[in-house]
Image: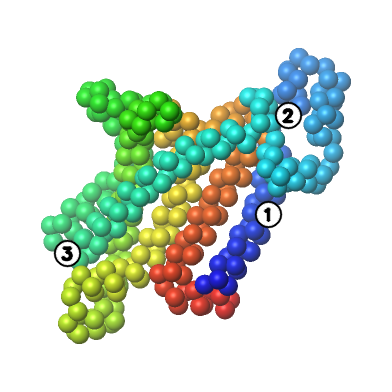
Amino acid sequence: MFLFTLTRLVYLGVVLVVMSILVFLITQAMPGDVAHLIAGQFASKEVVEAISIKLGLDQPLIVQYGRWAAGILHGDLGRSLTLEQAIAPIVIEALIRSLVLAVSALFIVAVLGIGLGVLAAVRRGKLSDQMVSGISYIGIAVPDFFWAILLILVFGSYLQLLPTGGYAPISDGFLAWAKHLILPVITLVLMMLARVARLTRSSMIDVLQTNYVKYARAKGMPERVVIFRHALKNALLPTITVLAINFGWILGGVVVIETVFSYPGLGRLLLFAIQRHDLPLIQATILLVSTAYCLANLVADLLYAFVNPKIRHSMSNN
């Protein structure tokens, strides 16, 4: 397991280096001149050139990348052109807020989604299976913003039980903090629950038809032991992948949800930076989201190896 983990960490380092290069090159190719943006549209050419020299924008790209990468290794993500302050505290604060959403939603989705998927697979063709399948179809077909608007109308406008948007720091009280999280978390759960439940059901049905499960039943093992100890461990492999991908997606890809609920997370911060062409903030945010995706996949690989030792041995040999 140690060798397997070490190999995956080396791969992770290589991927992050490549991702940092791609992020830097892509953001450099974006339309617009940072120096001109800072100086203003009526600034003279001399002023723009002076700002470019001050920021080092006149130097070759490899020199600019080296300086940027060196700063990241020392924990310096640069300064925001729009907010005129250090980027690191901004992105860390937004990351923590998005992590709260991601961890809360994924925990609920993992428990409910896997539970419903197992229930539907075990009772295949019965009423409970049909109900889970019907709910899954609805969940996949309905777009995410619809759930958000529906929840706002029902619980915010009509019942007036929960705030319809914004964010309250935990210093304002746990109850106020939790109330602002409920609707975004429920929306994320509704978006992901259907896919996890259907995938778990499909994978579980395939595993229940394998020979080793039939052999376990033939030996007279209790049904719960057959399902949870023998079948579920192997059926969870594709579900782990989906949960890991969804974790990275939540951190940087739920711009719609964070915008609808005015939630100041990482996705909304990225949208803010793009709208204002804040190049250092764009670079830092995208790199952080990419790192989150890579770490989520690393966790998925480690869970694969923990659940199925055959995968650990085969990957270590490669």
Could you say where residue 63 lies in the image, as x and y percent from the top left? 82, 44
Mark closer to the observer (1, 2): 1
CA separation, marks 1 and 2?
24 Å
Amino acid type for the residue under numbered disc 1: Val
Mark closer to the observer (1, 3): 1
Determine which residue is flagged by label 3. 123
Could you say where residue 125 lies in the image, as x and y percent from the top left? 16, 63
Amino acid type for the residue under numbered disc 2: Val
The quarter of the picture where the C terminus appears is bottom right
Instruction: Indicate which disc, 2 or 3, sits on the residue closer to the N terminus.
Output: 2
Secondary element at image label 1: helix
Q: Which mark is residue 267?
A: none
Residue under the point 52% across and 35% down: 94
CA separation, marks 1 and 3?
48 Å
Instruction: Indicate which disc, 1 or 3, sits on the residue closer to the N terminus.
Output: 1
Residue 145 visible (yes or no)? no
Amino acid type for the residue under numbered disc 3: Arg
Question: In the depicted view, which residue is nearer to us: 312 or 93?
Answer: 93
Q: Quadrant of residue 72?
A: top right
Question: In the depicted view, which residue is nearer to us: 194 or 76?
Answer: 76
Question: In the depicted view, which residue is nearer to us: 116 or 313?
Answer: 313
Mark 2–mark 3 contact, CB under 8 Å? Answer: no
CA separation, marks 2 and 3?
60 Å
Determine which residue is flagged by label 2. 34
Q: Quadrant of residue 198?
A: bottom left
**Left or right for 243, reference 67:** left
Residue under the point 33% across and 44% down: 189
**Left or right for 220, reference 136:** left
Determine which residue is flagged by label 1. 17
Mark 1–mark 3 contact, CB under 8 Å? Answer: no
Q: Residues within 10 Å of mark 2 (few under 14, many from 20)?
A: many
Q: Is residue 101 above or below residue 128?
A: above
